[in-house]
């Protein structure tokens, strides 16, 4: 019993030491099977970057406008007398030359005008006879000078009324010795027919309540008229060179000068009329076409980035900029115009970036800022 007890006491400390060593080895074994840390795995998949440099850009004030014919070269043709239209030979959009017959008008009003002329002729014959007799009586001191002066005045009035009646017949398009009751309506200027207000067989009233038979405009020069808000008035002045953009001809480059700025403010829209006069030798520009007046502002430096580089969150606008540690900082920026070239949409960044910085141009929505804003 004594020997056994001694052996037990001798080996017990060795068993405890082995147990402690075994426990201390377990953590080391476990560490060898831990997976790689997240930092060692691929990151920023789908993120594209680019080094940015400033460029000179110019802001443009774009004024919506439309094209119209110069009012000084627009003629509305009205019937000279009441009657029926026949033989209408023009159509809207057709070009006519000065003196070309566009229609005929048949009217009974010419009969009234001729009757007035015949009455005036009779009065002239009567007044001339009275004046001739008065001269004889005055020569024999039978007629006073005052009475003779009255006869002279009556004769002058008769001649004046006859000439007036003759002129009226000519204005209606007839000759005083003619018996015709139709008059040819002719184009007073060369140009394009903008619209027609009548048709063959339609009755036309006299000048008092007439509707236009046709409107003819010479389109060798046209007006581009736009509406500018009063807040933009400081950037517009007469004589300034502007660009004209016409949606109908996207490749057509037009340049003109501001000819006039209206002095009357529209009380409803609070806009002013701006007018640009353009030559139109080929008549490409048509009345009532849409157009835009582009007024260049002062040049300034800006960064042009793809629209995908600029992100928005609530009322914040920002981009991601690469930092020295390989991460990306969120940077607040101020943006300007959106530049749409059809296939690519870019955006101006006015402030917040520096020359030579690397900016995320695509995939920024996948990132989280490491520092900065």
Image (cartoon, rainbow, N blue to C red):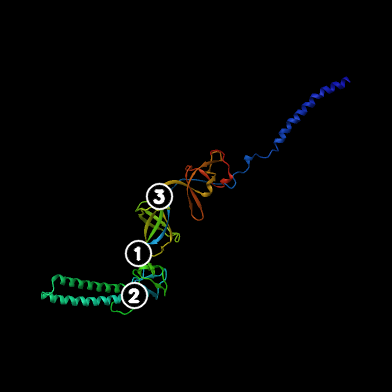
Q: CA distance from mark 2 to mark 3?
A: 53 Å
Mark number displayed over residue 230: 3
Q: Is residue 130 left or right of residue 271?
A: left
Residue 82 horizontal/vertical position (percent): 36, 73
Residue at the outermost top position: 2
Residue at the outermost bottom position: 179
Q: Residue at x 34, y 75 (%)?
A: 109
> Which mark is in front, 1 or 2?
2
Asked which secondary structure carries label 2, the reply is helix
Q: Is residue 327 left or right of residue 127?
A: right
From the viewer's side, name the closer residue of 247 and 138. Answer: 138
From the viewer's side, name the closer residue of 273 and 146. Answer: 146
Asked which secondary structure carries label 1, the reply is helix
Mark number displayed over residue 109: 2
Q: Does the CB distance between marks 1 and 2 fall below 8 Å?
A: no
Whichever of labels 3 and 1 marks the residue nearer the N terminus, that label is 1
Q: CA distance from mark 3 to mark 1?
A: 30 Å
Q: Residue at x 79, y 24 (%)?
A: 13
Mark 3 packing: few (<14 Cα in 10 Å), some, or many (20+)?
few
Q: Compared with residue 136, is residue 355 higher up or lower down, i.e. above or below? A: above
Question: To which residue does mark 1 refer?
Answer: 73
Residue at the outermost front position: 142
From the viewer's side, name the closer residue of 274 and 254. Answer: 274
Q: CA distance from mark 1 to mark 2?
A: 30 Å
Whichever of labels 1 and 2 marks the residue nearer the N terminus, that label is 1
> Which mark is in front, 2 or 3?
2
Whichever of labels 2 and 3 marks the residue nearer the N terminus, that label is 2
* Image-quadrant location for residue 168: bottom left
Mark 1 packing: few (<14 Cα in 10 Å), some, or many (20+)?
some
């Amino acid at each position: 019993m004594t020997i056994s007890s001694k052996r037990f006491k001798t080996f017990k400390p060795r068993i405890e030491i082995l147990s402690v060593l075994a426990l201390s080895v377990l953590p080391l074994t476990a560490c060898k099977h831990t997976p790689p840390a997240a930092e060692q795995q691929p990151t920023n998949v789908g993120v594209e970057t680019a080094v940015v440099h400033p460029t000179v850009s110019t802001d443009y004030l774009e004024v919506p406008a439309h094209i119209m014919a110069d009012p000084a070269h627009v003629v509305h043709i009205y019937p000279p007398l009441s009657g029926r239209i026949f033989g209408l030979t023009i159509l809207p959009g057709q070009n006519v030359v000065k003196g070309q017959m566009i229609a005929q008008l048949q009217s009974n009003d010419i009969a009234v005008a001729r009757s007035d002329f015949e009455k005036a002729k009779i009065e002239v014959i009567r007044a001339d006879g009275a004046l001739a007799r008065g001269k004889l009586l005055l020569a024999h001191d039978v007629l006073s000078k005052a009475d003779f002066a009255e006869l002279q005045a009556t004769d002058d009035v008769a001649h004046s009324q006859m000439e007036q009646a003759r002129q009226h017949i000519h204005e209606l398009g007839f000759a005083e010795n003619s018996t015709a009751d139709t008059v040819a309506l002719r184009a007073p200027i060369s140009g394009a027919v903008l619209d027609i207000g009548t048709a063959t067989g339609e009755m036309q009233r006299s000048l008092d309540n007439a509707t236009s038979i046709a409107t003819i405009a010479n389109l060798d020069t046209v007006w581009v008229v736009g509406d500018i808000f009063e807040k933009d008035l400081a950037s517009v002045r007469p004589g300034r060179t502007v660009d004209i953009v016409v949606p109908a001809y996207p490749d057509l480059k037009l340049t003109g000068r501001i000819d006039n700025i209206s002095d009357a403010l529209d009380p409803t829209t609070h806009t002013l009329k701006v007018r640009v006069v353009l030559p139109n030798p080929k008549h490409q520009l048509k009345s009532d076409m849409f157009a835009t007046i582009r007024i260049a502002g002062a040049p300034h430096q800006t960064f042009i980035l793809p629209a995908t580089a600029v992100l928005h969150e609530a009322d914040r606008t920002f981009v991601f900029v690469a930092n020295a540690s390989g991460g990306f900082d969120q940077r607040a920026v101020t943006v300007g115009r959106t530049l749409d070239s059809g296939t690519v949409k870019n955006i101006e960044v006015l402030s917040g970036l520096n020359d030579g910085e690397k900016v995320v141009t695509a995939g920024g929505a996948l990132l989280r800022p490491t520092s900065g804003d």
